[in-house]
Image (cartoon, helix red, strand yellow):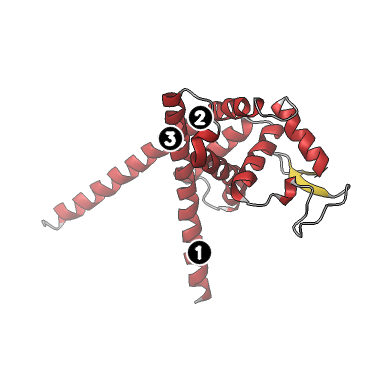
């Protein structure tokens, strides 16, 4: 019985992983269409689409990468394509971009951002030397204090507050990643199409053989 639950969970994880990849493909296309129509930078005008994009993107390049590394059949066509997608995305961003994608993901996912706040989870001031762990793309970790986190964000934006530079940064990042995600969306759609054609041909052969 226990093994059956494990197998069911693994099947669910596989379906959920593929579903999240589809979410990334859809958000990528919808943001591109909205940006093209409005001719605006990617900013709060894109609302939940933009927030959802960074949540899904981070999960794919962080937890999705770890998930793929655990799979024995990572050469299966779908997983192989998604593995290439993740590798190409990571190859197109630097460690600062990696940090900012995580930053935007957390901003979209949490009400209270204690990691980026001078207050801790108990609403008390943090100690000045309190540190938070972050990760480089290669998986190595580093620690930053609250002040160092702010300095890093401002450095990426190129300005003290980032009010004017942040939309430009987001725009450049998303535009850089769009063609990569779009390319693999088309590749996986082609894989699905071939699988469906093969399945339909098999069913038709069975019908003919049985003279239904």
Near-viewer residue (169 or 45) = 45
Near-viewer residue (208 or 173) = 173
Q: Which of marks 2 and 3 is nearer the N terminus?
A: 3
Find disc 2 in the rendering and name its residue: 178
Disc 1 versus disc 3: nearer the observer: 3
Q: What element carries label 2?
A: helix
User: In this rendering, does residue 200 appear at all?
Assistant: yes
Q: Position of residue 93 (x, y in %)?
A: 64, 31
Find disc 3 in the rendering and name its residue: 30
Other-residue count near label 3 (Cα within 10 Å), few / some / many at <14 / 14–19 / ≥20: some
Q: Relative to 85, does residue 19 appear above or below in the rendering?
A: below
Other-residue count near label 1 (Cα within 10 Å), few / some / many at <14 / 14–19 / ≥20: few
Q: Where is residue 124 in the image (x, y as percent from the top left)?
A: 81, 56
The CA distance from mark 2 to mark 3 is 11 Å
User: In this rendering, does residue 69 appear at all?
Assistant: no
Q: Is mark 1 on a helix, strand or loop?
A: helix
The residue located at (44%, 25%) in the rendering is 38
The CA distance from mark 2 to mark 1 is 32 Å
- Looking at the image, residue 184 sits to the left or right of residue 96; the answer is left
Q: Where is residue 47 in the image (x, y as percent from the top left)?
A: 51, 39
The residue located at (53%, 47%) in the rendering is 74
Q: Is mark 3 on a helix, strand or loop?
A: helix
The CA distance from mark 1 to mark 3 is 31 Å
- Looking at the image, residue 84 sits to the left or right of residue 187; the answer is right
Q: Which residue lies furthest to the left in this view?
A: 211
The residue located at (57%, 45%) in the rendering is 55
Near-viewer residue (22 or 120) = 120
Q: Position of residue 8 (x, y in %)?
A: 47, 66
Disc 2 versus disc 1: nearer the observer: 2
Q: Quadrant of residue 92?
A: top right
The residue located at (29%, 49%) in the rendering is 199
Find disc 1 in the rendering and name its residue: 9
């Amino acid at each position: 019985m226990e093994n059956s639950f494990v197998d069911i969970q693994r099947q669910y994880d596989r379906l959920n992983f593929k579903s999240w990849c589809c979410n990334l493909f859809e958000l990528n296309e919808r943001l591109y269409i909205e940006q093209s129509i409005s001719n605006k930078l990617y900013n709060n005008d894109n609302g939940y689409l933009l927030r959802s994009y960074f949540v899904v993107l981070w999960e794919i390049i962080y937890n999705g990468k770890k998930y793929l590394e655990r799979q024995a059949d990572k050469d299966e066509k779908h997983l192989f394509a998604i593995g290439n997608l993740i590798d190409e995305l990571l190859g197109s961003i630097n460690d600062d971009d990696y940090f900012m994608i995580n930053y935007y993901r957390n901003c979209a996912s949490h009400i209270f951002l204690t990691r980026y706040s001078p207050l801790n989870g108990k609403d008390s001031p943090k100690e000045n030397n309190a540190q938070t762990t972050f990760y480089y793309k290669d998986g190595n970790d580093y620690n930053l204090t609250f002040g160092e986190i702010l300095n890093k964000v401002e450095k990426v934006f190129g300005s003290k507050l980032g009010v004017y530079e942040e939309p430009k940064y987001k725009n450049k990042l998303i535009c850089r990643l769009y063609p990569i995600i779009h390319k693999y969306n088309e590749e996986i759609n082609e894989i699905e199409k071939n699988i469906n054609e093969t399945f339909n041909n098999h069913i038709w052969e069975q019908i003919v053989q049985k003279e239904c």
